Amino acid sequence: MTEVTREARWIHGLAGITLAGFGLAGVYFAGGDLTPGVWAWFVTLGLVVVFLPALRVGSALGRPLADLREVISATRQDGDLTR
């Protein structure tokens, strides 16, 4: 896992927690009941915000970064900077 992917996961994790928290706070301050169904809805929504973008970013960056690692490794071995 690369640093970019870890950072993106942290950002999406915080966004998901924030979204769930603000949603629950909105229901609470509007005078609604915080039933288990409401909790489940906002937790599910928060998890979707966390995992879908993180998976997309991870898969989009995974292959190009692996290619870059291979080129860097080959350059270190033979010193050819024309790649």
Image (cartoon, grey):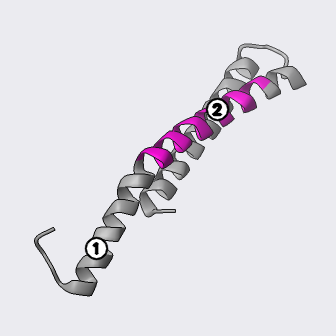
Q: In this view, which residue lies farthest toward the right?
A: 36
Numbered label attached to residue 6: none
- Looking at the image, residue 9 sits to the left or right of residue 27; the answer is left
- Looking at the image, residue 44 sits to the left or right of residue 65; the answer is right
Residue at horizontal 81%, vertical 27%?
A: 40
Is mark 1 in CB contact (under 8 Å) with mark 2?
Answer: no
Is residue 54 in the magenta section?
Answer: yes
Alpha carbon distance from label 1 to label 2? 35 Å
Q: Main secondary structure of the magenta part?
A: helix
Disc 2 packing (10 Å; few <14; some 14–19; many ≥20): some
Vertical placement of residue 27 versus 46, above or below = above
Nearest to N terminus: mark 1 or mark 2: 2
48 or 57, which lies in front? 57
Residues shaded magenta? 41-60
Vertical placement of residue 41 versus 14, above or below = above
Camera-near label (1 vs 2) is 1
Numbered label attached to residue 48: 2
The image quadrant that residue 20 belongs to is top right
Q: Report the residue marked by disc 1.
A: 72
Q: In this view, which residue lies farthest toward the left?
A: 82
- Looking at the image, residue 59 sits to the left or right of residue 50; the answer is left
Residue 14 percent coordinates (x, y)? 57, 44
Residue at horizontal 52%, vertical 62%?
A: 1
- Looking at the image, residue 6 sits to the left or right of residue 65; the answer is right
User: Quick one: quadrant of the C terminus?
Assistant: bottom left
Is residue 67 in the magenta section?
Answer: no
Vertical placement of residue 23 versus 67, above or below = above
Tell me the element at label 2: helix
Residue 54 percent coordinates (x, y)? 54, 43
21 or 4, which lies in front? 4
